[in-house]
Structures are given as structure tokens and as C-alpha cells.
Amino acid sequence: MRTRTLGTTGPRTSTLGLGCMGMSALYGTADRGESIATIHAALDAGVTLLDTGDFYAMGHNEMLIGEALRSAPAAARERALTSVKFGALRDPEGGWSGYDGRPAAVKNFAAYSLQRLGVDHIDVYRIARVDENVPIEETVGAIAELVEAGHVRHVGLSEVGAATLRRAASVTPISDLQIEYSLISRGIEDEILPTARELGIGVTAYGVLSRGLISGHFSPDRQLAAGDFRGMSPRFQGENLRHNLGLVEALRKIAEQKGVSVAQIAIAWVLSRGEDIVPLVGARRRDRLTEALGALDVDLSPDDLAAIEAAVPAGAAAGDRYPEAQMAHLDSEH
């Protein structure tokens, strides 16, 4: 497993990270045993970065990772790095009611995460969305105090725009910005990514397969389970879906010419965007993990990259990446 460093101040991690959200929430039912086996397989393959959020199924995802770490070999457990998002407020029915970035809340969230994960520190800690009622300086300042106390190693951010990135970095070193980045979600290229690079901040890219949309495995007649986020996602609706799957078919032709899968070429494209970018793959099963890891062996030539850009130009996707209400919470989109 090759490695990359998250910015100038962050940890050295595997070139690919494992996004664990789907093992607990938002994509329908997952198999607990298979999820743990997938985490173990990732660790065995040299994947060190495990990404989660304390609000994924109200703590379930953190407890799942904790269980997987406890049952992993000691050497793999010691290499594992935890990346945790916090701040989302939930209710017993699973609803969403905003974000809390107050310093006291930051430390409260961290205390619970440490317990659920069964670790003595969190490697990268970040608020999932900016709390509009709390200056970002206060939120990251509280994380910096957790770093000083030894409970957290690095301060991260999630889905923030360039101006917020600068404000946060003026308070404390920021290791990385976690943000959606894929062939069909390239908004960060205009201002956010250049700003992150100017400040020495890395990027952990989530949604590199756009929630399975550009994985090559999604069909237009697929029936989604109740509660599956994609049932509300604009890119998975009606004409938007048909248009977007047309882009996938154009990408499939390039993948077939190289003898790789659509998912592998989509992940390889994100990998090609810079050594300061670590893609998170949301594999819930070992076979999908194996496929994703195969992207590490895909070498994209300048001609390949040009063909990919022609097949899926920037801005080619139909539909926003989140429903309107959720888009309103994205500082990165303002």
C-alpha cells in the first residue's frame, strides 16, 4: 500500500481510505458480519484511514468500527487512523435538526466518540457542517484544545468554502478538508482546492463514485430500500438519472479499453488529481473493496485523462449532489 500525507501538518495515511458510513446508515440494510470482515480486509490490505461520523445511525457506526478494531490483529489495530465527523443533531426517529459547533458541545461529542470507538485518541476530528450560529474559529479552537490535551491528533474540516478554510487555518493548523470530489462533482477545483493547496491543507475526497452512481454497477431500474439516501438525491431521479447513467456508459467504453472496471477508472481519476488528495471508498463488502483497491494499479496516461475528460466533462452531471434543504447547509456551496 502506497501512502500520502494529509497536508503539511497531518498524518501519513494509506493512499485510499475506507468510508464506513454505508455500513450503518443511509444506503439501506447492511450486513454487520460482512461490514466487520470488510474493515478487517481493508486493514490487512494496508488501508489505515477509517472514516466515520458520530451521527451515522446515532453512534452505531463508531461502535461497529470499535468492534472491528478490537477483533483485528494488534499490528493492524495500531496502524489504524480514525477520522471522525461530529456536530449533526438527530432525533429518535432519525431526523436531522441542525448542527452544534459550540466548544462545550465539541468536547462532549468527542468524549462519546472516544468511548464508542474504544480508542484513547481520535486521529482527525472535524465538524460535519459549519454551525452558522458559532464562528468557525471557536469550533476549531475547541478541537485544538482537545489536541493539546491529547484526545485528538489533528484538526480537520468538512464541506467548507475557501473563506472559512482561511479563517479556520488562522486559528490552528488544519490537516485536511473532507469534501465531495469525483468526476461528476468538481466544484472544488475553482477556488476551494487552490486555497487548500496554498494553505498546505490536504483533501480527503468522499463520494468518489457518487454514491454508486458512477460505479458501473447502478442500473436505471434498481429498487432502493426504504431510507436509502439516493431515493431523495436529485442525481438519482428520473431524467437526471438517465442522463447521468449515459455518462457512465461513455466512461465504461474507456474502462473496457484499458481492461479495468468503471469504478476503478473513476477512483484512479481522483487519485490522479494530486498527491495531496486521499480518496475515501465506501465499500460495504469485501468484493467491492477488492475492486476499489484495484484502482491503485490503474495508470492513466495523458491520453487516458483526455479521453475521460471528453467523456465526462466538468459540470456534465444532471442534478445537485444533495436535496435543496441539505445543500443549504453546505458552506462549500455558498
Image (cartoon, rainbow, N blue to C red):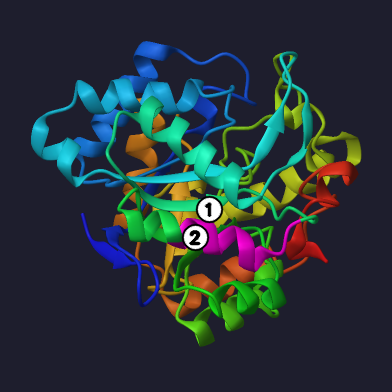
Q: Measure how far apart labels 1 and 2 are at the Cα level.
A: 5 Å
Residue sitting at x 57%, y 29%: 56
Is the residue marked by circle 2 packed among few (<14), some (14-19), or many (20+) residues within 10 Å? Answer: many
Q: Secondary structure at mark 2?
A: strand
Q: Amino acid at mark 2?
A: Gly
Magenta stretch in the rendered image: 134-144
Q: Is residue 172 above or below residue 53?
A: below
Find out whether residue 139 is within the magenta segment.
yes
Q: Is residue 197 above or below residue 307?
A: below
**Looking at the magenta stretch, what is its main secondary structure?**
helix
N-terminal of the two: label 1 or label 2?
A: 1
Residue sitting at x 32%, y 47%: 294
In this rendering, would 90 be left or right of 146? right
The residue nearer to you, when weighing 296 against 248, is 296
**Which residue matches tag 2?**
156
The residue nearer to you, when weighing 279 against 113, is 113
Quadrant of residue 283 within the rendered picture: top left
Residue sitting at x 38%, y 73%: 275
**Which residue matches tag 1?**
126
In this rendering, would 243 be left or right of 70? right
Q: How far across and down, in percent of the image, does residue 272 sit?
A: 44, 70
Quadrant of residue 250 within the rendered picture: bottom right
Q: How far across and down, in percent of the image, does residue 117 sit?
A: 36, 30
The residue nearer to you, when weighing 34 against 175, is 175
Q: Amino acid at mark 1?
A: Arg
Q: Are marks 1 and 2 in contact (CB under 8 Å)?
A: yes
Q: How far across and down, in percent of the image, does residue 103 sit?
A: 59, 52
Q: How far across and down, in percent of the image, does residue 155 sit?
A: 45, 61
